[in-house]
Image: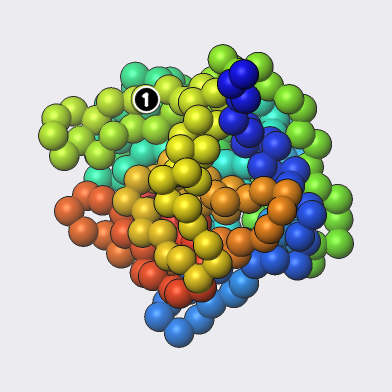
Amino acid sequence: MTVAPDRVFTRLARLTEHPRATVLVRCAGALSTEEVTAAQLLDGCRRTADALRAAGVRRGDKAVVMTRDAYRLVASVYALISLGAVPVLIEPRAEVRRCLDEIAPGVFIGEPLAHVARRALGWGRGRVRTALVTGRGFPGRGRFQGESLPLEVPDGSGPAPGLPEPRPDDLAMIAFTSGSTGQPKGVEYRHSTLAGQLAALDAVLGAEAGDVLLSCFLPFAALGPLLGADAHRSRAVRAGQQVHEGGQQHHENRPGAFHGAAAATS
């Protein structure tokens, strides 16, 4: 009898079993890091989901996420998935305007520079109805960039987000290829697809504490904190500082853990 692989929500729920385990390391430059625990990440996902819901984000909405901050990327992606919305991940060196014209996202979540580019280059023009800014904005944020989306790391004392169980064929994420071998293409990931890929990575990597994952693919980077998560052992997952080379995403390796997520807008 074939057993279906654990879905994203199941893996997220298992993080509650080890609330003090480090699941992400937020890097700000070469010398500054901040460890994020499972409790903090789950608390942050719930807070982010509440903020997105208050901003009008609803089930089925396609939401572009562009930020170089590992925690803000992961919290946004997980919060969107928990609402039934669809995170859209795009390599910023791709043909962003054409990509957004193709999928017509209603929501754009990004750091200030991403919103400046959105306005100046016409990304999602006439499509984006909700613009949300992560991090510190420039003067005139509300008028020119969008409304603030608070995404600071919480203390972890709050509850985890509600995790309604999706159907296997529900759309979970859209990720565009880098375009290094042709025009970037939007690939749809169903919940069953993500579950299968996470299970395959667990089996292939056979990772233990102390292993390092070099992620060159944004969806796997965003889902990094869920790799190896199970009910029997806790594995730390860390997100490294991103380095860009040749249109791919590379993470600075830190021993002792998996790498998690980082996205870029520059």
Crowd band around label 1 with a 10 angstrom C-alpha radius: few (<14), some (14–19), many (20+)? few
| Residue 241 percent coordinates (x, y) | 41, 67
Q: Nearer the viewer, residue 174 or 2?
A: 2
Amino acid under disc 1: Val
| Residue at the far bottom in the pictured view | 31
Q: In the shown orientation, is residue 165 left or right of residue 212?
A: right
Q: In the shown orientation, is residue 38 left or right of residue 62?
A: right
Q: Nearer the viewer, residue 156 or 145?
A: 156
Quadrant housing residue 46: top right
The answer to whether 190 is drawn above or below residue 155 in the figure is: above
Task: Name the quarter where the N terminus is drawn.
Answer: top right
| Residue at the far left in the pictured view | 181
| Residue at the far front in the pictured view | 1
Residue in the picture at 53% in, 77% down: 33
What residue is shown with label 1? 187
Task: Name the quarter where the C terminus is drawn.
Answer: bottom left
Label 1: which secondary element: strand
| Residue 125 percent coordinates (x, y) | 39, 27
Residue in the picture at 31% in, 45% down: 92
Residue in the picture at 77% in, 27% down: 164
The answer to whether 213 is drawn above or below residue 170 in the figure is: below
Quadrant housing residue 61: top right
| Residue 221 percent coordinates (x, y) | 44, 50
From this viewpoint, is residue 108 visible?
A: no
What is the total number of numbered labels drawn onto the structure image? 1
Q: In the shown orientation, is residue 178 left or right of residue 119?
A: left
